[in-house]
Amino acid sequence: MKLTCLSKGNGVHYPPCHMLELCGFRLLLECPVDLSAIDVFNPITAVGQIDPLGFICAEPWYKAAKNLHLWNVSLIDVVLISTPAGLLGLPFLTRNPKFSAKIYATEATMKIGRLMMDDLVSMHAEYVQFYGHGNTAFPQWMGWDELERLPLKLREAAIGENAGELGCWLPLYSAAEIDVCMDKIQALKYAEEACYSCTIVLKAFSSGLEIGSSNWKINAPRRNLVYISNSIFESSQALGFDYGSLQGADLVLFSDMTSVNDIEEDFCHIGCSTSNVDNDEKDWISVNTSASG
């Protein structure tokens, strides 16, 4: 078993993203978009009110999970989506003709995620109406001269601290590509089993975060895992955290848990460096945010 952090995330609206290699299969855990990075683009409502020299004045691109673009999408076998926010980057993968992975999410997560993607496309259309369509191959704002004139904080948001995140930016998907993406997802009810390749059994359980949000039980021939995503132990907005998902697990991968009922708080986020797990003892794998993403 091997666990690799692709992105440490930044809160409920940008969940962590990991690649889990298990029994010869690669499982992608979440596929989010860093919506906070759109701050580098000049807000349309602020045109004429904010100094445009401090922002990128162009059709926006969108920042996918860090390091996900370094993976060959044809090698991904399964994608598990736990929350609507974890769904927003999925059309970037499904529009790639080499992508053939099986995708699982609850029906509520699919519906809410679809609404969020539709809103994103509508918002983007306003930018296009104002700025026009940019160069879809290599926009002018990606040039170093343009990036260097940005304030430090915005430049770091665009390219990362070590200028290694420029490849994360992608042109937004279309409404038609959202349709294609949604058709590829298999909807599951809580505790409903899905068997992948007659080897791995997957089940979704309530995480208590929001309607349809889930944790995942992953049963493999030699290892029973539970992947705990953003979770709240006491929730007034959704079905509570399902502790039954932990039964029978000999390894738990956990991220972003809180015991208070406020999803707007800054939770403890978990990232991880590549980790190998070879023993058969019961383990909790806590993935520290200080680890390299």
Image (spheres, rainbow, N blue to C red):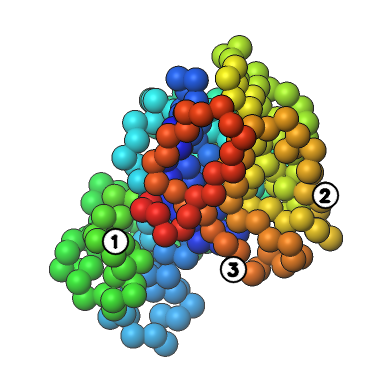
Circle 1: element type:
helix
Circle 3: element type:
loop
Q: Amino acid at mark 1?
A: Ile
Which of label 1 and label 3 is nearer to you? 3
Q: Which residue is mark 1?
A: 159
> Position of 45 compared to 56: left or right?
right
Of residues 92 and 8, the one nearer the viewer is 8
Quadrant position of residue 179: top right
Identify the residue at horizontal 59%, vertical 68% (top origin).
Answer: 266
Looking at the image, do the residues carrying marks 1 and 3 touch, with CB atoms under 8 Å apart? no
Query: Is residue 174 visible in this depiction of the protein?
Result: no
Quadrant position of residue 108: top right
Task: Where is residue 273? Give x, y as percent.
Answer: 39, 46
Q: CA distance from mark 1 to mark 3?
A: 23 Å
> Position of 90 compared to 81: left or right?
left
- Image label count: 3
Q: Which residue is mark 2?
A: 239
Quadrant position of residue 155: bottom left
Circle 2: element type:
loop
Query: Is residue 8 visible in this depiction of the protein?
Result: yes
Q: Amino acid at mark 2?
A: Leu
Task: Where is residue 122? Give x, y as percent.
Answer: 55, 57
Q: Please rate how many residues cluster around mark 2, counting C-alpha atoms within 10 Å: few if below 14, some from 14 to 19, many from 20.
A: some
Looking at the image, do the residues carrying marks 3 and 2 touch, with CB atoms under 8 Å apart? no
In the rendered image, the vertical position of residue 89 relative to residue 251, given as above or below: below
